[in-house]
Amino acid sequence: MALHHKLCHTLGVTFNLPHAETHTIVLPDAIAYNEDHAKAQTARISFALGVEGTVPGAALALYDLAVELGAPTALESLGVGEGDMQRAADIALQNPYWNPAPIEHDAILKLLSNALQGNRPA
């Protein structure tokens, strides 16, 4: 999704983060952010991951899969700090891509802070 792509590129370029790991960390939170606005798409992801009918199925299933595989789940494990999240949100919002859910600064900052700490998506 557009938000996922934009945030990962912003984080990668700004903080010199590894591409694949950054995408792995941000994807569950970006899916959770968009889930109510992209129900058909997230339902297909949920079906593919065997969690069809649960809410928020796709985001949690992707997070749990990353944990199960031993993939990183926290941006802080890549060396990013809490103070970097405001900067990342500001940069990402300067020229946002189209996205199913409205792009709102406080919500993006919350998404990034969640990804920073590696919490399961809310």
Image (tube, rainbow, N blue to C red):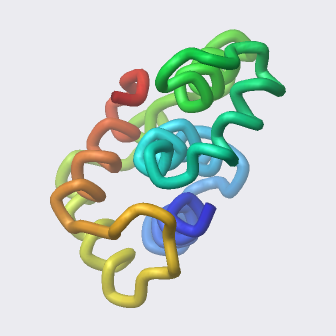
Q: As displayed, is residue 11 above or below residue 120? A: below
Residue at the (41%, 47%) spot, across then down: 33
Q: Residue furthest top?
A: 68
Q: As displayed, is residue 121 above or below residue 4? A: above
Q: Is residue 58 left or right of residue 6?
A: right
Residue 16 visible? The answer is: no
What count of labels does the image hold?
Answer: 0
Image quadrant occupied by the C terminus: top left
Residue at the (49%, 43%) spot, across then down: 35
Q: Is residue 76 left or right of residue 2?
A: left
Q: As displayed, is residue 19 above or below residue 91? A: above
Residue 18: name its quadrant. Answer: bottom right
Q: Nearer the viewer, residue 34 or 111?
A: 34
Query: Residue 104 placed where, x, y %?
Result: 24, 67
Q: As displayed, is residue 44 above or below residue 85? A: above
Q: Residue furthest bottom?
A: 95
Residue at the (55%, 61%) spot, across then down: 8
Image quadrant occupied by the N terminus: bottom right
Residue 116 visible? The answer is: yes
Query: Residue 3 placed where, x, y %?
Result: 50, 64
Query: Residue 91 placed where, x, y %?
Result: 33, 79
Residue at the (59%, 29%) spot, across then down: 72
Q: Nearer the viewer, residue 92 or 48?
A: 48
Query: Residue 48 placed where, x, y %?
Result: 83, 26
Q: Residue furthest right?
A: 48
